[in-house]
Amino acid sequence: MYTIEIEAITDFTTEVLACLDETYNAIPEFDQPYSSQVISRRLLSGPALLLIARVEGDIAGFKLGYQHSNETFYSWLGGVLPDYRGLGLAKSLLEYQEHWAKMQGYKQMEVKTQNRFPAMLNMLIGHQYQITAMTADKQRLSQNKLHLQKQL
């Protein structure tokens, strides 16, 4: 049995942003990554939450979101490093983020994913997220972007 901890961060220091950048760049699915400047700009523009999952003290994954409106929290980026998959970390991060958002007074969560991430889509649907829209990529169906929402 592993020791798993989730750390919640709302104060984005230079060190926190550097740690996030390193973890984000280590996740292979982010093959078209956002720059550290784009990530910093979104995090520093208003209320935001970074969750860091640690297994035996080592960073194993993260989940990042920010206020979209007074009532909506947007779950923007997240992932688990390949060596730590299968431990339920993504589910734990999602549940923590939802609970935190609800305690902050948000009424709903929004998230986007793509067809190429079926595990993420299945997890979201299993947590009562509803598909609200789709942005099609007619040349690459795997790139279709699915918009989902959940009432908290």
Image (cartoon, helix red, strand yellow):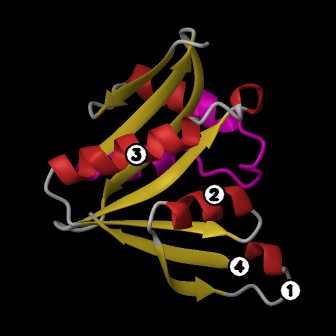
Q: Residue under circle 1?
A: 139
- The residue carrying mark 2 is 120
Upstream in the sequence, badge 2 or badge 4?
A: 2
Asked if one can make out residue 42 in the rendered structure from this viewpoint, the answer is yes
Q: Residue placed farthest to the right in the image? A: 139
Res 96 quadrant in image:
top left
Q: Which residue is mark 4?
A: 144
C-alpha gap between disc 2 and disc 3: 13 Å
Q: Magenta segment: does it hold 59?
A: no
- Nearer to us of marks 4 and 1 is 4
Q: Secondary structure at mark 1?
A: loop
Q: How many marks?
A: 4
Q: Amino acid at mark 1?
A: Gln
Name which residue lies at 61% across and 66% down.
Answer: 113
Q: Residue at (16%, 66%) from the top-left corner? A: 70
Task: Name the mark on residue 95.
Answer: 3
* Residue 88 found in image quarter: top right
The reply to whether the C-beta atoms of the residues labelled 2 and 4 are less than 8 Å apart is no
> Is residue 46 found inside the magenta-colored segment of the image?
yes
- Which comes sooner in the sequence, label 2 or label 3? 3
